[in-house]
């Protein structure tokens, strides 16, 4: 297939996207923009910092688990379920990814043992926690290579060394960077240069100014070609011969 034909198909596809981009946002026709329940509260909590716990109560994992069970802590004591992991402690060092969405209630119910994550507690009660047994991770883990607490992991390492091995052992949950994190996409309103009321071709050309590689990549996917393995198409269990990559051309 010629490069010219590829470019024609790419233009057709991006024109459809550009038409959508050029249309007024549906959100602009409403008085409010929908956000997930608890999203703003989660964003606010993510920016909070707490004092560093100076001393922790030293005890083995078995005793720790037994004592937590003895306190009768349960999922009902988890006052908040939805968190965004987006701590300014980590962002002060690097800020390459968007926040991680974390469902605390789901993890607590699934594990059945709070000590898996809350593996230590402060030696003294903490005024900033609902329960001193289950203070937040950043109460003990903050700056990496902290000069006063060199034996403690930094917050980023604490997250990764707690979450990833557990996901691998349970064969549940993401274990790759992009499985948990979204890339931190820059604000495009400062990057895109378009005239007032642009047409579809102008929007397409502006997108291609930065995203030509991504546009070419799309041309080789099953989503574009309509060609490839499919167990859901009758009599085509191995390969579909009809599609944009062979006999059809359209802009859907």
Image: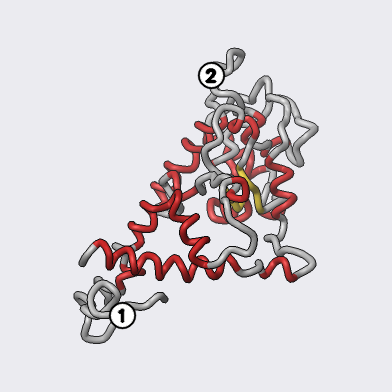
Q: Is residue 42 left or right of residue 104?
A: right
Q: Is residue 235 above or below residue 96?
A: below
**Residue at the bottom extreme?**
234
Figure quadrant of residue 3: bottom left
Q: Quadrant of the N terminus?
A: bottom left
* Residue shown at the point (68%, 24%) measured from the top left: 53
Please name the residue that numbered disc 1 is placed on.
232
**Residue at the front extreme?**
195
For the question of whether residue 10 can be seen, the reply is: yes
Q: Are marks 2 and 1 in contact (CB under 8 Å)?
A: no
x, y percent for residue 180: 49, 48
Query: Exactly how many numbered labels are in the figure?
Result: 2
Q: Nearer the viewer, residue 234 or 172?
A: 234
* Residue shown at the point (72%, 63%) measured from the top left: 33
x, y percent for residue 91: 60, 33
* Residue shown at the point (42%, 76%) measured from the top left: 252
x, y percent for residue 238: 19, 75
Colour approach in the figure: secondary structure
Figure quadrant of residue 237: bottom left
Q: Is residue 69 above or below residue 243?
A: above
Q: Nearer the viewer, residue 196 or 53?
A: 196
x, y percent for residue 56: 64, 24
Q: Is residue 184 above or below residue 155?
A: below
């Amino acid at each position: 297939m010629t490069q010219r034909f590829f470019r024609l198909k790419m233009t057709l596809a991006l024109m459809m996207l550009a038409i959508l981009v050029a249309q007024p946002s549906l959100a602009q026709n409403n008085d409010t923009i929908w956000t997930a329940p608890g999203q703003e509260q989660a964003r606010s909590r993510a920016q909070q910092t707490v004092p560093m716990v100076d001393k922790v109560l030293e005890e083995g994992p078995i005793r720790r688990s037994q004592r937590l069970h003895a306190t009768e802590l349960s999922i009902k004591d988890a006052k908040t379920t939805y968190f965004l992991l987006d701590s300014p402690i980590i962002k002060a060092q690097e800020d390459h990814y968007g926040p991680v969405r974390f469902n605390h209630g789901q993890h607590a119910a699934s594990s059945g043992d709070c000590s898996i994550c809350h593996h230590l507690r402060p030696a003294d009660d903490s005024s900033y926690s609902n329960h001193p047994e289950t203070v937040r991770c950043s109460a003990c883990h903050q700056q990496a290579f902290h000069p006063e607490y060199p034996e403690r992991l930094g917050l980023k390492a604490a997250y990764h060394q707690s979450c990833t091995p557990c996901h691998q052992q349970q064969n549940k949950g993401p274990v790759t960077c992009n499985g948990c994190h979204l890339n931190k996409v820059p604000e495009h309103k400062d990057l895109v240069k378009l005239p007032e009321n642009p047409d579809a071709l102008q929007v397409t050309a502006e997108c291609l100014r930065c995203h030509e590689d991504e546009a070419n990549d799309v041309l080789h996917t099953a989503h574009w070609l309509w060609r490839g393995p499919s167990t859901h198409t009758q009599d085509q269990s191995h390969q579909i011969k009809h599609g944009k990559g062979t006999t059809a051309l359209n802009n859907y």
